[in-house]
């Protein structure tokens, strides 16, 4: 959990929990509702690992036109072909890319 500013510890029942230097504190699960409801603590958002890619595909756009998808850049070769994740196809096709011929 993230402690409110200026807080250096919290209590749940008779137990004290020290706030770490980064402003976080670890408490038992049963303490969460009480501390978030009235004491100003918030839950730490857990980062969700991205799903593994289904593979890659060659797409063609205008010559030398690269693109980006979800923060990742894809450079085009001299023929305008990029290699992108299969998951990006639907988003890139609406921007004029098409599946490239193998060759």
Image (cartoon, rainbow, N blue to C red):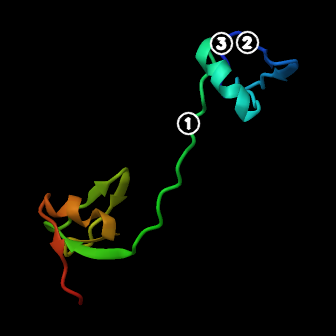
Q: CA distance from mark 3 to mark 2?
A: 10 Å
Q: Position of residue 19 (x, y in %)?
A: 78, 22
Residue drawn 47% across and 61% down? 51
- Looking at marks 1 and 2 on the same chain, the residue that comes earlier in the sequence is marked by 2
Q: Nearer the viewer, residue 5 or 99?
A: 5
Residue drawn at (26%, 67%) of the image:
76
Quarter of the picture containing the N terminus is top right
Q: Is residue 23 left or right of residue 49?
A: right
In this view, the residue in front, 35 or 92, is 35
Q: Position of residue 45 (x, y in %)?
A: 55, 36
Q: Is residue 59 above or below residue 3?
A: below
Disc on res. 75: none
Quadrant of the image for the C terminus?
Answer: bottom left
* Residue at image mark 3: 39
CB within 8 Å, label 1 to label 2: no
Residue to which mark 1 is pinned: 45
Q: Which picture quadrant has residue 64?
A: bottom left
Camera-side residue of 76 and 29: 29
77 over 33 or under it: above or below: below
Q: Earlier in the sequence, mark 3 or mark 2?
A: 2
Vertical arrangement, residue 89 with respect to residue 22, above or below: below
Residue holding disc 2: 7
């Amino acid at each position: 959990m993230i402690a409110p500013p200026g807080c250096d510890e919290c209590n749940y029942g008779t137990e004290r929990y020290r706030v770490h230097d980064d402003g976080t504190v670890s408490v038992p699960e049963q303490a969460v509702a009480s501390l978030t409801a009235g004491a100003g603590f918030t839950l730490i958002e857990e980062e969700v690992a991205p799903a593994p890619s289904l593979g890659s595909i060659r797409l063609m756009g205008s010559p030398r036109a690269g693109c980006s998808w979800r923060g990742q850049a894809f450079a085009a070769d001299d023929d305008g072909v990029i290699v992108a994740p299969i998951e990006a196809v639907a988003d890139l096709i609406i921007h004029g890319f098409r599946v490239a011929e193998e060759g």
